[in-house]
């Protein structure tokens, strides 16, 4: 596909006192955030709103996805106190909603970090009973026991991203499996969790492929769906094939509403955790 002439979306860089507060708490708590590690374009807006996506299990991922700027290599992380530090950071930030994610830890066989995941959810809830907890997890290699351990910790929203349409999945994330991601979502729904996923566009997919994927996802029972523009973090990463227009994002949003997603976010700078606090309030209000 020939790269579109449309312009790269503009990022607003504003760092008010809330941004500095969040940055200070994250630094003092020795925590990682996907906001910084993945070079998220919304870090300024989100931190100014006193929201952040905390990243557990270290800052080194065992996979090397073509779109992601998180460091890849052999992890050396070993910090059993991390769940407690996460819980205390959430309390310091006085969050009503927190998103927790992690690197892939394929090196931790038959666990894949799931015990730390479950403990982090439990400790965060214990110390912050009024804060809703959203998790954005890896696929845990499809390991059933690991998945169920995280499910049993009962996060308020369970999220796992399919990232892109199936046809280009191996180009985008060679060490993952598109159908395995679908299975993770299906199992979380069968367990009874509120479930969310998202994908990037601008990687060479067609409009019809996006809509077919959305239909497949909503038919699984996923309630929240996000669509955002892929932005190339460095020259070593996948090249942007197209900058999708705002009108096309609006069309995807309208289509998503019509086919039955309870909440759909679609826009150039939308990311899986973008305005997750507002999404959580909206979906919980629908169930009250």
Image (tube, rainbow, N blue to C red):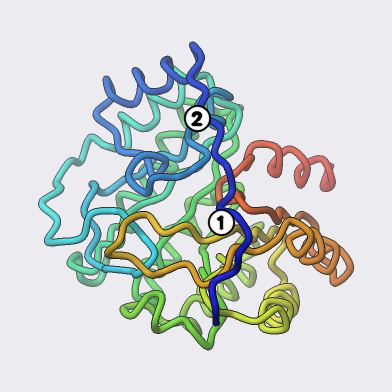
* Residue 34 sits above or below residue 105 on the image: above
Residue extending farthest right: 258
Of residue 41 and residue 245, the one placed in the foreground of this image is 245
Q: Closer to the observer: label 2 or label 1?
A: 2
Split into 4 quadrants, where in the image is the N terminus?
A: bottom right
Of residue 233 and residue 71, the one placed in the foreground of this image is 233
> Residue at 21% across / 60% down in the picture?
72
Question: Residue 259, how many percent across, how many down?
Answer: 85, 72
Marks 2 and 1 sit apart, C-alpha to C-alpha, by: 25 Å
> Residue at 27% across / 64% down in the picture?
236
> Residue at 34% across / 18% down in the picture?
24
Residue extending farthest bottom: 167
Q: Are marks 2 and 1 in contact (CB under 8 Å)?
A: no
In the picture provided, is 9 more to the left or to the right than 232? right
Indicate which disc, 2 or 1, sits on the residue closer to the N terminus.
Answer: 2
Mark 1 burial class by Cα count in 10 Å: few <14, some 14-19, many 20+? many
- Residue 281 visible? The answer is yes
Disc 2, SS: helix
Could you say which disc has been placed on residue 158 in the image?
A: 1
Could you say which disc has been placed on residue 44 in the image?
A: 2
Place residue 27 in its image quadrant.
top left
Of residue 149 and residue 219, the one placed in the foreground of this image is 219
* Residue 59 sits above or below residue 178 on the image: above
């Amino acid at each position: 596909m020939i790269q579109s002439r449309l312009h790269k979306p503009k990022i607003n860089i504003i760092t008010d006192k809330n941004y500095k507060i969040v940055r200070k708490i994250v630094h003092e708590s020795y925590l990682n955030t996907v906001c910084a590690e993945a070079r998220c374009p919304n870090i300024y807006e989100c931190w100014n709103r006193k929201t952040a996506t905390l990243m557990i299990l270290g800052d080194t991922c065992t996979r090397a996805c073509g779109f992601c700027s998180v460091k890849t290599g052999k992890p050396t992380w070993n910090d059993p106190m991390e769940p407690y530090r996460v819980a205390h950071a959430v309390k310091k930030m006085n969050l009503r909603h927190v998103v927790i994610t992690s690197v892939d830890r394929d090196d931790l066989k038959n666990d894949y970090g799931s015990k730390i995941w479950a403990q982090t959810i439990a400790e965060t809830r214990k110390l912050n009973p009024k804060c809703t907890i959203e998790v954005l997890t890896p696929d845990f290699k499809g390991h059933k026991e690991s998945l169920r351990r995280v499910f049993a910790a009962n996060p308020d929203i369970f999220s796992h991203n399919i990232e892109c349409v199936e046809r280009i999945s191996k180009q985008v994330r060679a060490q993952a499996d598109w159908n395995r991601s679908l299975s993770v979502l299906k199992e979380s729904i069968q367990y009874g969790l509120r479930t969310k996923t998202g994908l990037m566009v601008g990687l060479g997919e067609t409009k019809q492929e996006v809509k077919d994927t959305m239909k497949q996802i909503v038919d699984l029972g996923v309630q929240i769906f996000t669509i955002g523009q892929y932005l190339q973090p460095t020259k070593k990463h996948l090249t942007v094939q197209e900058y999708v227009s705002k009108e096309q994002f609006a069309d995807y949003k309208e289509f998503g509403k019509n086919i039955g997603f309870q909440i759909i976010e679609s826009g150039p700078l939308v990311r899986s955790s973008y305005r997750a606090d507002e999404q959580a309030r909206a979906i919980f209000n629908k169930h009250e």
